[in-house]
Image (cartoon, rainbow, N blue to C red):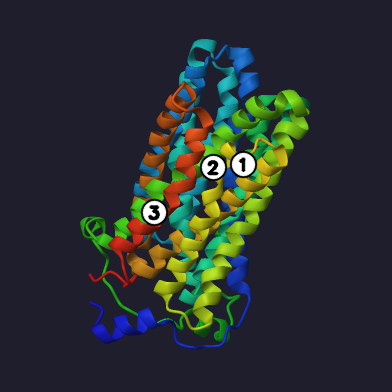
Amino acid sequence: MMSKSEGAVAQAGPTPVKASGWYRWVVCGLIFTATSLLYVDRLTIGYLRPSLTAQYHWTENDYASVVQFFMFAYAIGFLLFGQIIDKLGAKRGYMIAVTVWTLAHVGCALIGFLPVQYVLVSFMLSQAVLGLGQGGNFPAALKVVAEWFPQRERSLAIGWFNAGSNLGAILTPLIVPFVLLAFGWQWAFVATGLLSILWLLVWIPFYSKPAESRFTSKEELAYIESDPIVPVKQLPWSRVLLKRETWAYGLGKLLTDPVWFFYSFWLPSYFTSAYLKDYGLFLGVQLPIILIFLISDFGSVLGGWMSSAMIKSGLSVNKARKFSLLICAACVLPVGFMTMLSTNLWFTITVIGIAAAAHQAFSANLMTLTTDLMPKEAVGRCSGIGGTSGAIGGIIMAHGVARALSGLGGYSVVFLVAGLIYVVAVLVIHTLSPRLKPAQF
C-alpha cells in the first residue's frame, strides 16, 4: 500500500531528473503507427461500402448491422485486452491484439469467394473479430507509455500516439479508393492489412521494457524511472472496478468518445447533405473532412504538450490536467451553436476542425489520467473499462443520432449535445477525483 508520504511525493510531481535520451520517442512512434493502421483497417469497409452495396444489394440496415457487430465486439475487446495486457505485458498483449485484428481484416478478402447468401453474416463476424482485436490497441498503448515515460511526459506521449487516429483517417481515403479502382475491393483489404503485418515485424524484435532494451542509455533509463516507485501486487479486477478513480476515467470516456464516433461516421453524410449540391464532391465533402482531421492532429499533440508544459512549469498534476481539460471543453463549445450562427462552408470547417482538435487534446489528457490515478499493474484494466464505456456511449450515440436525423431536430441537436458534453465530463471527473490522488489499494 502507498504510504502518505509516497502519495504526497507522487502528487507533487516527479523527481527532478534531467531529460535524456531519445529511444522512448522511437517507441512512441511505434504506437503512433499502430494507431494509424488501426484506423486505416477500421475505416476501410466504409470506403468500400458503395461497391459492396452494388454487388450484394445491401440495405442501410445491413450496413448498420455490420457496424453494430464491430461496436459491440470493440466494447468487449477493451475489457478483455485490459486484463490480458496487465497479465502478459505490453509487448505480447499488443502483438496478440494486432494479430487478431489483422487476420480478421485480411480475411474479409476471402468473403468474396463465398456464396452470396453467406456474405453479409460473414462480414458481420469478421468485423466483430476486427473490433475485438482493436479493443486492445489503446490499453496496450497506455501500458507502453506508463512503462517508457515519466509522469511529466506522459500526456505529451499520449498526444503523439493518439494523433495516429487522425493520420489513419486521412490515409484511408488516399489508399483504399486507389486500390479499389485498380484491383478491386478484395485487394483493398489485403493491401491495408499488409501494412499491419509489416508493423508486427518491427514491433516484435525492437520492443522491450526500458531496463531490458539494448537501445536505452543509462541516463535515459534513470529519467524514465525518475518517478517514485510504488510497489503494488497484481490487482484483482473487482478492486479496480470499484475505485472512484476508475470511473473518473470511465465516465469521461462514456461522455466524450461518442462525439468522435459521430465525427468519424456521420461527417461525410453531414457535408453531403449540406454542401454537395453547391460545392461538388471534392470541395463540399472530401476536402472538408481531410482538413478537419488535419486540424485535429495538431490538437492531439498540443493537448499532450499543454499539461506537460504546465507540470514542468511547477503546476501540480491535478491543476495541469484539469486546466487542460477545461480549456479543451471551452474550445468545443462553439460547435454546439455552429448551425445556428452560419452555414458558410469555411466557417463550418473551421469550427468543426477546432472542435475535433479540442476533442483529441481532451482525449490525450483524459487517457493520461489512467497513469496518474492507477499503478502500472492496473493501467490496462482501467483503460479497458474506460474503452468499453466509450464504446457503449458510441452505441447510445448512434441510436440518438438516428432519432435526431429522423425528425427530432436534425444535425443541430446533435452538434448542440456534442458541444456541451465536454463541460459535463469535466464536472464529472472533478467530482469523482477532486485532487487526482492515486488510487489506494
Q: Which numbered disc flags the more N-terminal residue, 3 or 2? A: 2
Q: Compute the Cα span from label 3 to label 2.
A: 19 Å
Establish if 128 lies above or below 389: above
**Relative side of 67 to 301, left or right:** left
- Three-letter amino acid code at disc 1? Val
Q: Residue 392's image quarter?
A: top left
- Three-letter amino acid code at disc 2? Phe
For the point 63% across and 13% down, the residue is 55
Q: Determine crowd level at label 2: few under 14, some 14-19, many 20+ residues with C-alpha closer than 10 A.
A: some
Q: Compute the Cα span from label 2 to label 1.
A: 31 Å
**Relative side of 283 to 144, left or right:** right
Q: Which numbered disc flags the more N-terminal residue, 1 or 3? A: 1
Q: Which numbered disc flags the more N-terminal residue, 2 or 1? A: 1
For the point 44% across and 59% down, the residue is 366
Q: Where in the figure is residue 352, as x and y percent of width and height?
A: 61, 45
The answer to whether the residue labelled 3 contacts the one labelled 2, judged by CB atoms less than 8 Å apart, is no
Which of pointers 2 and 1 indicates the residue nearer the eye? 2
Q: Determine crowd level at label 1: few under 14, some 14-19, many 20+ residues with C-alpha closer than 10 A.
A: many
Q: Where in the figure is residue 122, as x and y percent of width and height?
A: 48, 22
The residue that label 2 is drawn on is: 337
Q: Compute the Cα span from label 1 to label 3.
A: 29 Å
- Label placed on residue 151: none
Q: Where in the figure is residue 106, as x and y percent of width and height?
A: 58, 34
Q: Secondary structure at mark 1?
A: helix
Q: Is residue 369 visible?
A: yes
**Relative side of 351 to 118, left or right:** right
Q: Is residue 387 visible?
A: no
The residue that label 3 is drawn on is: 425
The residue that label 1 is drawn on is: 40
